[in-house]
Amino acid sequence: MARNFRLATVDDAEELLALTLRAYEPIRQLGINFAAATADLELVEKNIRNNACYVMEEEGRIVATVSLRMPWGLQPGPYGLPHIWWFAVEPALGKKGVGSALLQWVEETIIRDTLKAPAVTLGTADKHPWLAQMYERKGYVRVGQKDLGRGHTTIFLRKVLRPDLLQEK
């Protein structure tokens, strides 16, 4: 099946909203307050305009999305690196490598090869039963945590993509 990776446009907002709400249903059931879990069309459009929102299509249909918040953007991540957020995969396609394929493409093609960033970060809720461990299996390492006032502690993870460019403090 041919996969197409691209930046989202505002024309994709309705399809992305529907995908996001389906994908984040388990998050809502866990009571975790991720912005994407209760997004509306205005928030999706804002994400597309203010961040690098990527989609993966199969047969012309969006099946996964992930966004990057940039260090120079309006909502930078905590470590001065591109920060992954708003990651959603069509639930019917779970455990089939769709999310992994999109994540790997963004890590390698966009963050490492295009932006030349040494690493990437992301955050997840301590209340989620398996997300932090999933990211750790993909090479992410815990680098901190913080209570951001959302009813859970956010665990921050980082994955080094270009060790030759990493400047540790």
Image (spheres, grey):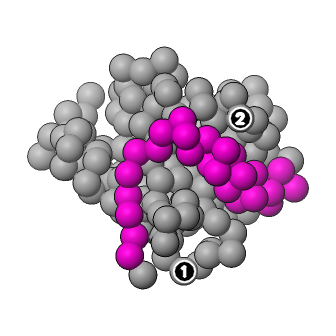
Reading the chain from its start, which is encountered first: label 1 or label 2? Answer: 2
Q: Which residue is mark 2?
A: 41
Prevailing secondary structure class for the magenta stretch in the rendered image: helix
Q: Tell me: residue 51, above or below residue 19.
A: above
The answer to whether 135 appears left or right of 3 in the picture is right
Secondary structure of residue under mark 1? loop
The answer to whether 117 appears left or right of 42 in the picture is left
Tell us which disc is closer to us: 1 or 2: 2
The answer to whether 82 appears left or right of 115 in the picture is right
Q: Which residue is mark 1?
A: 96
Query: Residue 131 colored magenta?
Result: no
Disc number placed over residue 69 in the picture, else none: none
Secondary structure of residue under mark 2? helix
* Quadrant for the N terminus in the image: bottom left
Residue furthest to the left: 164
Percent of width and height locating residue 68: 44, 39
- Estimate how packed mark 1 is, as few (under 14), some (14 to 19) or many (20 or more) residues with alpha carbons within 10 Å: few
Residue range in magenta is 2-29
- The part of the image, by quadrant, that contains residue 152 is top right
Nearer-the-camera pick, 13 or 77 = 13
- The part of the image, by quadrant, that contains residue 33 is top right
Nearer-the-camera pick, 154 or 18 = 18
User: Which three-letter amino acid code belongs to the residue tagged 1?
Assistant: Lys
- Which residue is painted at 80% across and 60% down in the image? 26
Percent of width and height locating residue 88: 60, 56
Q: Tell me: residue 167, above or below residue 99.
A: above
Query: Residue 21 colored magenta?
Result: yes
- The reply to whether residue 14 is visible in this rendering is yes
User: Which three-letter amino acid code belongs to the residue tagged 2?
Assistant: Leu
